[in-house]
Image (spheres, rainbow, N blue to C red):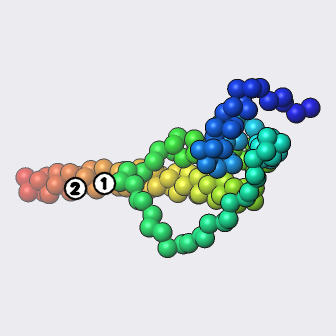
Amino acid sequence: MPKRWSKAEIGKLQSLLKAGELWPVIAAELHRSVEAVKMKAKRLGFVVVNPPRQPTTTTKELDIPEDLPSLQEALQILAGALKAAAQPGLDNTEIQRLQVVATLARTYEALLTNFMRYREIEKRLVELEAKYARLAQEKTKGHAAK
């Protein structure tokens, strides 16, 4: 059975609609699905219009971070996408966006794991090179002393 709307929720819905908020934002604020919010708005006499799709582009510049996000941060993003994807009433665009976020988080996790492994290997190689340099130097000194 659907959850009943309280007077406070109806008031918040009305104020968010009058402020021009987007359906997903309103739904998140009220902890309800987008469809439930649209149906209630319609019953309250608001005109329910789906906004026109915004044109998509692949030419937008990426904001490249200076430091790599940690594995924990990547997993938190993935967890947020999974939680958002579990909400009922998502439109296809939002589902696709969440799928992209989840795919990017998984890819980042795999790449970060490999990066950390390579950094550890690199560190060990530097240590071994220093050790071999010391050994070669000691060997040279030993031959010079004879």
Q: Is residue 110 visible?
A: no
Task: Of the two numbered discs 2 and 1 on the same chain, state the one appearing first in sequence.
Answer: 1
Report whether 72 appears left or right of 7. left
- Residue sitting nearer the eye, 94 or 100: 94
Q: Label 1's element?
A: helix
For the residue pair 65 and 135, the one nearer the viewer reads as 65
Which quadrant of the rendered structure holds the C terminus? bottom left
Instruction: Say which residue appears at 50% left-offset and 53% top-offset.
Output: 112
- Judge whether residue 27 can be spotted in this image: yes
For label 2, the residue is 133
Looking at the picture, tell me which residue is in the foreground, 104 or 53.
Answer: 53
Q: Position of residue 134 (x, y in %)?
A: 20, 51
Residue furthest front in the image: 45
Residue under numbered circle 1:
126
Tell me the quarter of the picture where residue 57 sits: bottom right
Tell me the kind of residue under disc 1.
Val
Taking the spot 67% from the left edge, 54% from the top edge, the residue there is: 98
> In the image, 142: left or right of 123?
left
Q: Residue drawn 63% across and 44% down?
A: 18
For this view, does 52 lie left or right of residue 70? right
Q: Is residue 109 left or right of residue 3?
A: left
Q: Position of residue 16 (x, y in %)?
A: 63, 40
Q: Quadrant of the N terminus?
A: top right
